[in-house]
Image: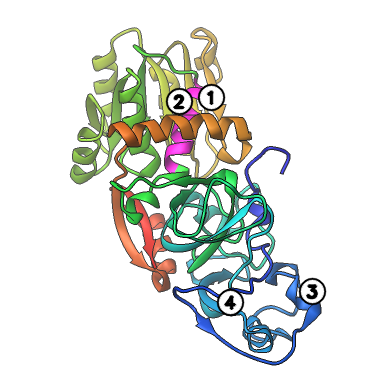
Amino acid sequence: MNGRLPRPGSFGSAPLLPLEAEGAGRWACGASAVHTYLLRSPAARPAGEDGPGQLRSDIQIAMATGRKLMRAIRVFEFGGPEVLKLQSDVAVPIPKENQVLIRVHACGVNPVETYIRSGTYSRKPTLPYTPGTDVAGVIEAVGEGVTAFQKGDRVFTSSTISGGYAEYAVASDDTVFSLPDQLDFKQGAAIGIPYFTAYRALFHRAHAKPGESVLVHGASGGVGLAACQIARAYGLKVLGTAGTEEGRSIVSGNGAHEVFNHRETNYIDKIKASVGEKGVNVIIEMLSNVNLSNDLSLLSYGGRVIVVGSRGPVEINPRDTMVKESSIIGTALFSSTKEDIRGSAAALQAGMETGWLKPVVGPQYPLEKAAQAHESIIHSNGASGKMILLL
């Protein structure tokens, strides 16, 4: 992995597991192994062997070897939410060296997963794959070399290898973290991508400092609320925006000093009036294709816009950056090094211990409604916490 997080292209690439464990799933039994297929994931099989017509399905392998089966969402082609297919005959993956197997209780749904599923993201996973990075659950088994965790530990993740929209998921042990008893599995599933992304945006990319101002543009979703909580805890003046009354109430209760309605035509003027001529030092931007031009007008001298999300191209005037010597900076969690992740994790664990890190759980769906969850993200009028799948 070269010290980096697993790439989206690695989703669904874990081999199969001979398990003798309790928990959800179905047992099948048989007499002999199909040796060629035991060491290969569905994603690694030749084209034409996956889907309805595959030559040897996971259930056939399970029947031949006594391997455990699970429910999981599988994507066999890029497209709309309808390509998210629930399968109940997926073989449980096996943790390799420095990996753990997690019995998933909840999995976060991130907007980036809708881009990946549609095939429009810059990095495409190998088909078929199972989406999902932010799981919370209990360690079921550990691979060789794992010393920090044991079976029965409550954990959450910032990434998975096999995909989180499933009853079981394999993750590298350096992307797995202890879940404190005061947080439930729903909250645990709301930590991973949102909080690690927000921390990276604020401190690894913007290099925000106590006393500076930060505008979280689109603050009522998972990353936005995480950014508000983190920035407030670290001594920044926090401004947030949201498009619904419910969203603004949530943002106000999670660290923002002031909250603005970004559906109002004059909300930019209101922000300018609030911060004065000095402008905003840092902007955490969730929808750059809509807001970036306005963001540049709000920045202070030396101000930084951190691009967390965008749904398309945008036209800006580069001159807006010249006099202020401001910057537009992208961020992507999968570019983090192991050192980055360790530093972020230490800060976030401290937040859990002291109480300022309080994940806000939003809409909840059962696993079989994953397509509906993606539809909701696409067509939502405004976020209100982190969306999760329950298993």
Task: Tell me which label, 4 or 1, sits earlier in the chain.
Answer: 4
Determine contact: label 1, label 2, CB under 8 Å: yes
Q: Which residue is mark 3?
A: 46
Task: Decide whether the magenta segment is chiefly helix, strand or loop.
Answer: helix
Q: Residues within 10 Å of mark 1 (few under 14, many from 20)?
A: some
Question: Which of the numbered marks, if any, corresponds to residue 371?
Answer: none
CA separation in Å, label 4 and label 3: 17 Å
Which element is circle 3 on?
loop
- Look at label 4 and name its amino acid: Val
Q: Which residues are magenta?
A: 194-206
Q: Is residue 204 magenta?
A: yes
CA separation in Å, label 2 and label 3: 43 Å
In the orientation shown, which residue stands out farthest toward the bottom? 31
Question: Which of the numbered marks, if any, corresponds to residue 205?
Answer: 1
Q: Residues within 10 Å of mark 4 (few under 14, many from 20)?
A: many
Q: Is residue 84 above or below residue 337?
A: below
Image position, residue 191 (x, y; %): 40, 45
> From the image, which quarter does the C terminus lie in?
bottom left
- Look at label 2 and name its amino acid: Leu
- Look at label 1 and name its amino acid: Arg
CA separation in Å, label 3 and label 1: 41 Å
Q: Residue at x 29, y 33 (%)?
A: 241
Query: Depth-wise, is mark 4 or mark 1 nearer the camera?
Result: 4
Name the colouring of the figure. Answer: rainbow
Q: Which residue is mark 2?
A: 202
> From the image, which quarter does the N terminus lie in?
top right
Query: Depth-wise, is mark 2 or mark 4 nearer the camera?
Result: 4
Image position, residue 311 (x, y; %): 50, 45
Q: Residues within 10 Å of mark 3 (few under 14, many from 20)?
A: few
In the image, taking residue 67 as reference, residue 46 lies left or right, namely right
- Look at label 3 and name its amino acid: Pro
CA separation in Å, label 1 and label 2: 6 Å
